[in-house]
Amino acid sequence: MKSKKEREERRLAEQLKVKQWLEWYNDPNPLKDELEIVWLYDPAIFPFVRASYTYSYWRERPLKRSEDYPDSPILVAYAVLKPPPFEAARAPVKQRCPVRRREFLIMPFDFDRPGNWPPSEGVDPFTIKPTERGYKTTLCYQAPTHRQRAVFASILNARQAKRDAKRQSANLRQRRRRKRLRAEQDEWKRTQRAKKRKFGM
């Protein structure tokens, strides 16, 4: 049974969460809290990147993307936001309102698009700045150069090598687990045989 003080703290936390969500939902400029754009790769590699939003409880932590599948998007850059207000920072993580953070992606098949027509969310990487929306330029419609294709191919190869290493590590752990289970089963059988010989069963 929760005490009266705990119930009051939970009620205030819920009110704060609703207030933050309404402020976020009605915010006419969702980019105003951006401090910087962190690039994980050289923006000159890509004719365009896909701009999108992700929802996170953290404003400063680096964003990550799963690379378990060949068609998984590649995270190229992400936005770092200003620290939250004092009352929001004191709230536990589970009681915070998620914030929108911009992320910029590239798909493994984007360099194979016929005519290099960028998607609707594609923007020129050099037009991306904190608190400002990116936009398309004539560079987005140019075919990738040989150097761009070579560097992008090396990125895809590195991802594939990482997936292969992860798969081999998982297989090795599975083999070790099976070997340990077989050893435990053999030990249990030996113990049972020893008990039968001892008691003449």
Image (cartoon, rainbow, N blue to C red):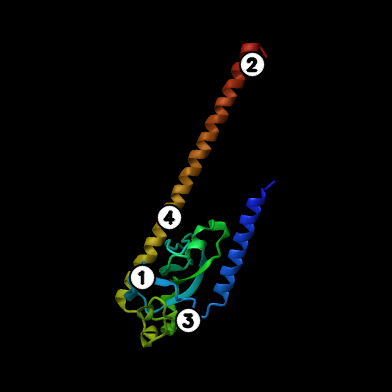
SS for tag 3?
loop
| Cα–Cα gap, marks 4 and 2 | 48 Å
Q: Which mark is residue 119?
A: 3
Q: Amino acid at mark 4?
A: Asp
Eye-nearest disc, 3 or 4: 3
SS for tag 1?
helix
Q: Residues within 10 Å of mark 3 (few under 14, many from 20)?
A: few
Tell me the residue at 55%/34% (across/down): 181
Instruction: Work out whether mark 4 precedes mark 1 in sequence or the reverse, and give the earlier one.
Output: 1
Q: Residues within 10 Å of mark 1 (few under 14, many from 20)?
A: some
Q: Amino acid at mark 2?
A: Lys
Establish if 168 lies above or below 156: above
Quarter in which the C terminus is drawn: top right
| Cα–Cα gap, marks 1 and 2 | 66 Å
Tell me the residue at 66%/11% (across/down): 200
Q: Which mark is residue 152?
A: 1
Instruction: Work out whether mark 3 precedes mark 4 in sequence or the reverse, and give the earlier one.
Output: 3
Dots 4, 1 in contact, CB < 8 A: no
Question: In screen coordinates, is 110 left or right of 96?
Answer: left
